[in-house]
Structures are given as structure tokens and as C-alpha cells.
Amino acid sequence: FDNGGICGVCKWSQEPEEVEFELTVLERLAARYGKRKGLWGIEILNEPILEDMWKTMDVENRYKAADLEMAKGTKPNTMEFIRGFYLEAYDRIRKYLPEEKYVVIHDAFELKAWKDFMREDKYKNVVLDTHQYLMMAEAMGCPQTVEGYKEFITLSVQGTKRLCHVILSIFGVILSRRTSSTPLSSALKMGKIPMAEVGESEGAKFAVLQGT
């Protein structure tokens, strides 16, 4: 979420030394594990937070800073930075990662923002990771009733399905829904789009979807 490991502190993207360190960690991972048979791919960054999600989650009040001095200057990442970080990270790890291995980017909770991203021929086997949390229902004013949640899930899945049909013409998609009450078969049914992998890891249901 803030990728810093310290509650209430989100500054790493403002600090060039930190950014470079993270890029070199990705390089070292790719160099060490890139050619291993068991490696499916590497995700560059998990859940970077941008301004809209910062406001939705009320970060400064919900995640009180453990160290007020360290938290000075904390603010959400920018889309411009995250896009640039992904491009730089791709170039660095692809040097070591064979083309058949995947490079995964998280949508930063902005699924609509990536339709024009990494369209050039140089970008091979890029997969978009999106996390559809049921908890967002409450933040969006969903009535906390069984019927309210059922309606939210239905509308959410329909909207996600439409978006994924568009996104899948560009990327593969890892669609992760954090809920134990919705059957995977219904929550992730994507029309005629083939599912390359379906499974569950540490309680998170997921599908790896590939466009045709």
C-alpha cells in the first residue's frame, strides 16, 4: 500500500536514493532467478497508492504515523512517477529475464488508466494485476446488508468484466478478488476469455487471464 513498511509513512517515491535501491533489488532478483524453470514472472511493485485512493482510504487519519518526524512530507505517489518507474524497471529486469517470463505491473487501483501503456513492440509478456476488494463497497457508500453487498458485487463484476475485455486486448490480467463468500466461478466468469490459471494463494482467489 505505501510500500515503506512503516505506518503512516509514504515518501519513497520522493527520494531518488530509495527509488534507485528498489530498482537495483529488482535487477538482482531478475539476475538471480530469471532463468529458473519455476519462475513465472516478477511483479515490479504491489499496490502503489495514488491520490484518489489516498482520499478514499483517508490515509492520514486511518493510518496514523508511528513516527511523526519521519512522516513529514508523506503524500501519495503520482501516476507520472509510477508509469516512469514501471518503464525503467521493465528495462532493467528484462536484461536478465527471458521473454517468456512475465513482467507484472499493478494497476495502482486505476484499472482504466493503462489502455495506452507499454504498447510498443519492445514490451513482451506484460501482465496487469488488479485487486478488486469487497471492502471498497463500504468506502463507496454500499449499504452494509446482504442485499446491498450482492448488488455491489453484481455491478462491480459487470464493470470489471467490461474493462477486462478492453484491457485483455493489450495485457494479460491477474484479477484478484478478496472475498471468501463469492464463488470463484461466478465472480471471475469472463465470457469466452480463456483462463490460463485459476487458483488460491494465502486466501486470495485469483485468475490469470490471457487475451486471444
Image (tube, rainbow, N blue to C red):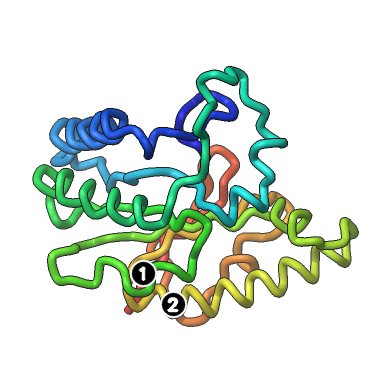
Instruction: Return the x and y of residue 124 as percentages of the image width and height.
Output: 19, 63
Nearer-the-camera pick, 79 or 91:
79
Q: Please state which amino acid type lies under the numbered disc 1.
A: Gln
Q: Position of residue 31 (x, y in %)?
A: 13, 35
Q: CA distance from mark 2 to mark 1?
A: 7 Å
Quarter assignment of residue 7: top right
In-image side of 81 versus 48 (left or right): left
Provide the secondary structure element on which disc 2 rests. loop
Mark 2 and mark 1 in contact? Answer it, CB < 8 Å.
yes
> How many labels were placed on the picture?
2
Q: Residue at x 23, y 33 (%)?
A: 20
Quarter occupied by residue 147: bottom right
Q: Residue 101: x and y, percent?
A: 21, 52
Q: Relative to residue 81, is residue 10 depicted above or below?
A: above
Q: Please indicate whether residue 193 sits to the left or right of residue 31 in the image.
A: right
Residue 29 in percent (x, y) is at 22, 33
* Residue placed most toward the observer, 140 or 37: 140
Where does label 1 land, which residue? 210
**Rendered position, 76 above or below 148:** above
Q: Disc 2 residue type?
A: Ile
What number is the disc on residue 19?
none
Give the residue at mark 2.
Answer: 193
Q: Secondary structure at mark 1?
A: loop
> Considering the image in quadrants, where does the C terminus appear?
bottom left
From the viewer's perspective, is 197 left or right of 180? left
Question: Could you tell me which residue is drawn at 20 percent across and 32 percent down?
Answer: 24
**Viewer-nearest residue: 143 or 209:** 143
